[in-house]
Amino acid sequence: MALKALDIYKLLPKKNCKECGDPTCLTFAMKLAGGKADIELCPYLSDEAKSVLGASTRPPIRLVRVGMGERFFKVGEETVLYRHEKTFYHPPGIVFRVSDTQTPAEIAAVTRRVRDETFTRVGADLRFSGIAIENTSGSAETFAKAVATVEAEQAHLPPVLIAKDPAAHAAALVHCGSYRPLLHAATGENYKVMCALAKKYGCPLVIRAATPDGLARMVKDCTAEGVQDLVLDPAPENLGTFLTRSTQIRQLAITRLVPELGYPVYLDATATGQQDAAVALGIVKYASVIVTDPLSPGATKASLTLRQNIYTDPQKPIQMNPGLYRVGTPDKDAPVLMTVNFSLTFFTLQGYLESTRVPCFMLIVDTEGLSVLTAVAAGKLSEMLVRDSIKKFGVENEVTHRKLIIPGYASPLSGRIEDATGWKVLVGPRDAAEIGEFLHEEWKK
Amino acid sequence: MACELNFGWTATIGEVVIGATKADGGTRRLSYRIGGGTTLPFMEDQAGSPSPLIALEICDYLPFWSPIAKNYCGDMTNSVSEWAKAADGTYGADLIRLYLTSTRQRNFSDIASLGKVVEDVLLASSLPLIIEGSNEPKIDSEVFQKCGEVAQGERLLLGTAEAGKYRSIAAAALAYNHSIIAQSPIDINLAKQLNILLKEIGVQRDHIVIDPYTGALGYGFEYSYSAMERIRFSALKGDSDLAMPMICSAPDSLTIKEVREAEPAVQDEMAIQWEFYTCLAAAAAGAEIVCVRHPGTIPLLRKAFADMKKPGAAAEVR
Ligand code: B12
Ligand code: SF4
């Protein structure tokens, strides 16, 4: 049950010392009530207050950070079951697995791949998130060596250490303990030792149990040991089990019915025997850390794109700032191409323009992030908008001609744009892929 | 505390039957009853609830088709019968979705030839059939009439009705007892409106499959994904005008940049994964029929759906 701000305030020290980052204890209490702050930010809480406030004030799903340096990632702090209710905030870390039985060359190659591979879409660099090292050999020493091999690449990737034996973790942590690796996994048998290791190195810990009930119980045990940064592995044996358990955990966590389940979820995509399916399902259905063997070229792009899609705010399409953009160094005779400020549209067109090698201007008008067709259908692209944008971005000072190329799909507006702007309108092709041909044939004339 | 998943939903997704066997007056070797869901996809209690169906899309006129699918299938694509036969046998689809792309040629008027195409496909395969008619208002009426008539008794799924064009499809469906696909551009309210329009001219709820319109992965898919979730939940909450099963097809998947420009050595794989990731996510959002153009996607989806249907041991939280 969530507490009201005033109930929380009663439990705070009322020093108004600002150390929590809030001006007063009362404003801090209000944040806590909204799930927007963590009680640990106040250093003066009594143990009693902590235990009362504990689970009921923190965000329904705890934010957990994996890794150090530039490539660290944060997961958790989600608030909804369906993205249309608000948005999903923290995309899952997709982590490539290597085994300590592989050769150092193989391990290093996977590490370099995760370090170097980027797939650029709509202006964002999409990458895999980290590297998981699994102790398949059974030897702590071999495991530690594999981890050392990864670290020797200086890739600074968030590590996930997978071993049943805490001794193997202890050996590996010597090499990567200061990089906030995620430890997998604490179980009923070993949790005390695993908690001690997680505490010693200050790193997050996965706990593994096959039922939400078992997970909730272990969360209590591990928090009692003093480890707060937990991740839940519901140990699914197939895709259906994953779907059911992860949905259950998310639902029980965000409604705070079982606050102990308020932690990000871990998915071993390789365990289901259907890795690509598991990765796809994990992305849409609440996995926060997904461990997979290195993916094929197709699955690489498809999974990174799906993750980008699902974690885009449904209220705000990814947008560009409206304005006049240059491709190459256009002069006063260079063509001006008008388009909308939906990022996907912008980057698609820009890509094709760059490959034509014709220096030009792109006039980006504000359609509130709608694509050309959608903006035309919604009436968001109008001749007035085009006229005002030409003025506002000073296009008339940049070129001496008065010719505007508009997207093929905006052709119904061509006459009206001519009337409103006094510019001659050339209707371009519908598909930006044909823009090169169009510029060479129509513009040069 | 027992914590089963409980969303307090009371309603059920309506059912639609596709395909008719001899017993039902058709010639198909099987028919499907889709819909009937009462909760989140893949989480039904009863073990027998259906898996999403996988349709392979084929066409009768190749210039308007993805070269990737054409190259993969090879010569058979020159004969719609051979292609349909392979969809059924070799590729193992649940359904065939035939696009009458020949109607998209300029000034097309040979309606009689369409009857022949539909007959050929019905003979070549005994799977239930989805038929996509024309996009041209001038010939729509005749095209759908012809398809409906030739396939009378087969319980086709006819596509695609939109807000601006639904009368000719509806007429053919009503006359010959087929069902129809009702498409609206990624918007729950428009989907509902179209269903109401169809209801008003007499198309029954159990003859409608909703197509919420699927943007390709990376090209609007997230909107479609959420539209599907929303339609499903509104239906489960009791909105009977949205309580129909859904079909998902992302026909642009094989033409988007990532797939079109893939290195030749990985192009098929890229196409397959693009369709696979899209369809799997769509099924998780509630699609009961998913459509693909690359045959290589079918076995992957089939295996994944089977595994997704496996129930998690009913877990209880104290
Ligand atoms: C995703 C999507 C949406 C999203 C919005 C996404 C966005 N940010 O715009 C949502 C769900 C919100 C949406 C809403 C609507 N949509 Co919509 N939507 C789509 C969808 C599936 C993809 C759009 C997209 O992202 N395209 C990709 C971008 C890159 O395309 P683009 O901007 O056109 O750019 C290309 C070309 O135009 C060209 N180009 C771009 N700029 C330039 C410049 C020059 C000079 C040149 C030469 C070329 C060029 O290059 C690009 C690549 O080739 C399309 C279907 C489709 N396949 O297009 C329907 C579609 C555009 N939507 C449609 C409709 C009707 C609507 C709505 C009016 C309906 C409604 N739901 O109420 C609303 C309107 C919006 C509103 N009121 O808020 C219809 C439009 C019908 C028509 N022909 O007019 C479409 C075609 C779907 C359909 N078949 O019915 N939509
Ligand atoms: S740190 Fe604690 S005592 Fe200080 S203002 Fe914040 S809530 Fe009050």
Image (cartoon, coloured by chain):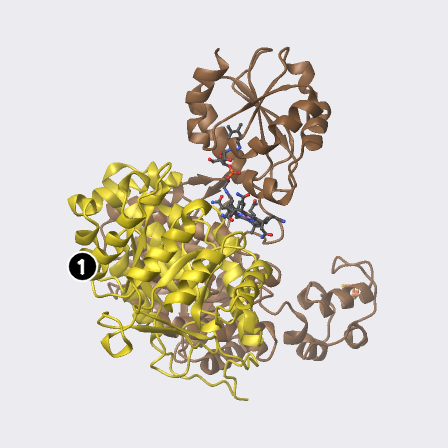
Chain colours: A brown, B yellow
Q: Is residue B33 above or below residue B252?
A: below
Q: Amino acid at mark 1?
A: Ala
Percent position of residue B169, x then y: 43, 58
Find residue A283 and report its image quarter: bottom left
Q: Is mark 1 within 8 Å of ligand 1?
A: no
Q: How many marks?
A: 1
**Secondary-structure class at tag 1:** helix
- The quadrant the N terminus of chain A occupies is bottom right
Q: Nearer the viewer, residue A332 or A239?
A: A332
Q: Nearer the viewer, residue A84 or B140?
A: B140
Percent position of residue A326, x then y: 57, 22
Q: Residue at x 68, y 72 (%)?
A: A57
Q: Is residue A329 above or below residue A228?
A: above
Q: Residue at x 18, y 44 (%)?
A: B74
Q: Is residue A400 above or below residue B247?
A: above
Find residue A259 and report its image quarter: bottom right
Residue where numbered disc 1 is placed: B124
Q: Is residue A219 visible?
A: yes
Q: Residue at x 29, y 44 (%)?
A: A109
Q: Nearer the viewer, residue B306 or A126?
A: B306
Q: Is residue B101 above or below residue B298?
A: above
Percent position of residue B242, x then y: 53, 69
Q: Within 10 angstroms of label 1, few (less than 14), some, or many (20 or more) residues?
A: some
Residue A61 horizontal side relative to residue B309, left or right: right
Percent position of residue B289, x then y: 37, 64
Q: Nearer the viewer, residue B148 or B217?
A: B148
Label 1 resides on the chain identified as B
Q: Is residue B295 visible?
A: no
